[in-house]
Image (cartoon, grey):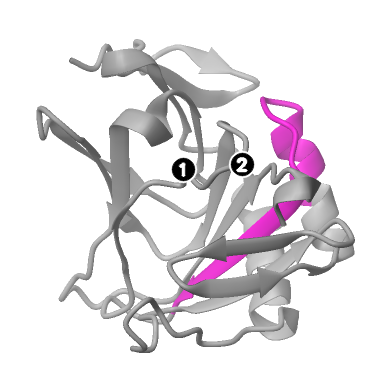
């Protein structure tokens, strides 16, 4: 079961909820982590300047989204048959990283995902690659999409709306016992950029 913190509780003038998930998973949800004007500034800058590319997945098909990778020198993120060597940090990404680290976590890599429409998505998965940290900071910019989590054994599923400026931090044993996804939608939605910050052991790159 998920225990919800009272959504009326505010922290730093925003609504922040901490959920304790089954089997030791933790999820922090802050719907208003960034003010809207700053979030739009970040969105437009990253949409125009990030080194977007369309990777191919494990079976050779193009991923249904664009990605870009940034981080510390020498860090490479490998998942589902893709190799993502980090480009040097952009100033904007370092600024965002500092803001998220002030809440929780320590990060040396950021994977950006650009969902161009409701047809772009990411399927059920866990970020459980060896040598990676257990805390992932995920910031949403742009269009509102649905973020879902599902327990591996009980199949308990929860849905969250991730809005412009929403922060989610996944921690504890969440990657071991839960999967997450952003499903396709037929709704007429605009573009969304998602930034996922994580720690990758330099020796595992």
Q: Are marks 1 and 2 in contact (CB under 8 Å)?
A: yes
Q: Is residue 81 magenta?
A: no
- Graded by Cα atoms within 10 Å as few (under 14), some (14 to 19) or many (20 or more), the crowding at tag 2 reads some
In this picture, residue 32 sits left or right of residue 118: right
Separation of disc 1 and disc 2 at Cα?
7 Å
Vertical arrangement, residue 22 with respect to residue 45, above or below: above
Residue at which label 1 appears: 128
Residue at which label 2 appears: 132
Dot 1: what SS? Answer: loop
Residue at left 46%, top 37%? 31
Q: Which residues are magenta?
A: 96-115
In this picture, residue 97 sits left or right of residue 40: right
Q: Quadrant of the N terminus?
A: top left
Residue at left 75%, top 33%? 106
Q: Is residue 114 magenta?
A: yes
Residue at left 42%, top 79%? 65
Residue 127 visible at all: yes
Q: Quadrant of the C terminus?
A: bottom right
Residue 4 visible at all: no
Vertical arrangement, residue 177 with respect to residue 48, above or below: above
In this picture, residue 2 sits left or right of residue 12: left
């Amino acid at each position: 079961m998920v225990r919800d913190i009272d959504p009326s509780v505010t922290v730093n003038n925003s609504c922040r909820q901490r959920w304790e998930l089954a089997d030791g998973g933790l999820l922090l949800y802050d719907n208003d982590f960034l003010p809207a004007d700053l979030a739009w500034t970040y969105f437009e800058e990253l949409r125009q300047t990030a080194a977007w590319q369309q990777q191919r997945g494990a079976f050779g098909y193009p991923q249904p989204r664009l990605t870009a990778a940034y981080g510390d020198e020498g860090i490479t993120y490998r998942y589902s048959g893709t190799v993502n060597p980090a480009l040097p940090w952009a100033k904007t990404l370092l600024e965002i990283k500092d803001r998220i680290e002030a809440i929780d976590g320590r990060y040396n890599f950021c994977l950006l995902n650009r969902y161009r429409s409701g047809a772009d998505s990411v399927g059920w998965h866990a970020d459980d690659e060896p040598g990676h940290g257990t805390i992932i900071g995920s910031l949403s910019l742009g269009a509102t999409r649905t973020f879902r989590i599902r327990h591996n054994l009980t199949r308990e599923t929860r849905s969250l709306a991730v809005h412009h400026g929403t922060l989610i931090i996944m921690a504890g044993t969440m990657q071991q016992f839960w999967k997450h996804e952003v499903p396709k939608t037929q709704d007429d939605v605009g573009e969304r950029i998602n930034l996922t910050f994580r720690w990758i052991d330099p020796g595992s790159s």
